[in-house]
Image (tube, rainbow, N blue to C red):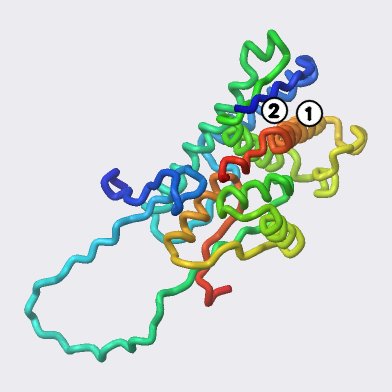
Amino acid sequence: MKRVEIKLNISAVAPLLDVIKQAADDLRGSLAIRATFPENDEEFNETWTSELLAGQNSDVRELLGLFGSEFFAEGSIAIDSPNSDSLLRGCSALRIQILTHWLQGIPADLLEDEDVPPEAIADELRVPFAAYTFLDQVQKIILEHLDPTAAEA
Amino acid sequence: MEPGRRTGWLGAGPENPTGGRVPPFRTRIIVAETKTKKTPRPAPAPQTQRAEVWRVVVLNDPVNRMSYVVMVLRRVFGFAEERARKHMLAIHETGRSVLWSGTREQAEAYVFALQQWHLTAVVQPEHAA
């Protein structure tokens, strides 16, 4: 089983966690991306949504679990193969929510740029933007080092 | 929906390559009526109608990174890297790509799996595309 440990700067990451936790709270009762349903059947669609929501909440909980007391003591998070799927999905859900809640006004080319100068982002949006890019980097590390597609082989 | 109607919630396997939950397929129950009242017999339906083909379409989104989308397509559909990348680029450049077509239930399963990974995916009948 592969395992990746990421050493983080606690003082840099801690403010981002406030945004991430708020996004997680927002997502508790709603999907990051509105579901589209194959059928026009209220009962069916309700079940479809509730199952997606249960999975999303579980993934987000897994991600938040990385930033518990151990993180604040050691400054590192550990990702291994079994939890990598949940973490990838959790990062995705939270990034979508952060974009929806805080970053709608930022042009797409800036959102996709990994080297955006801080002055390009309005002061009040810098922390949400940093949280958005931080989660992107966590995803990137998982994709590069844990090779989630290996599970299909 | 009562739990008993949640049929088809599959584990990992050929019908559910992601190993995750699949959508709430319902058992379709046909109740035969036993009334004997005579009603005008409708003209027999033509026998040329074929089972409809459904498409799984993935739409572009501004959040998920390209490598993430490629990984999801590989996981959900079992695509090779090159094929997944080709679809990802089509989604990115044209806004959408048809990933799969076939039976409605399997299409629904794929769309559900894609939505679990937070990709925007829809099921469409082939004639509507």
Residue at horizontal 64%, vertical 27%? A2
Residue with the mark numbered 2: A19
Residue with the mark numbered 1: A127
Q: Of all residues shown, which one is farthest toward the top? A: A73
| Residue B57: quadrant of the picture | bottom right
User: Cβ–Cβ below 8 Å for labels 2 and 1?
Assistant: yes
The image position of residue A136, as x and y in percent, is: 74, 36
Residue A58 visible to an observer of this rendering: yes
| Residue B58: quadrant of the picture | bottom right
What's the CA distance linking mark 2 and mark 1? Answer: 7 Å
The image position of residue B84, as x and y in percent, is: 67, 56
**For residue B14, side relative to residue A125 (left or right):** left
Q: Could you say which disc has been placed on residue A22 in the image?
A: none
Q: Chain of mark 2?
A: A
Q: Nearer the viewer, residue B73 or A112?
A: B73
Q: Is residue B54 above or below residue A135?
A: below
The image position of residue A88, as x and y in percent, is: 63, 36
Image quarter where the N terminus of chain A lies is top right
Image quarter where the C terminus of chain A lies is top right
Residue type at mark 2?
Val
Neighbours of disc 1 within 10 Å: few (<14), some (14-19), many (20+): some
Residue at horizontal 29%, vertical 50%? B5
Q: Is residue A84 above or below residue B58?
A: above
Q: Nearer the viewer, residue B40 or A88?
A: A88
Residue type at mark 1?
Val
Disc 1 element: helix
Q: How many marks?
A: 2
Q: Is residue A139 above or below residue B128?
A: above
The image position of residue A36, as x and y in percent, is: 53, 56
Q: Nearer the viewer, residue A105 or B75?
A: B75
Q: Chain of mark 1?
A: A
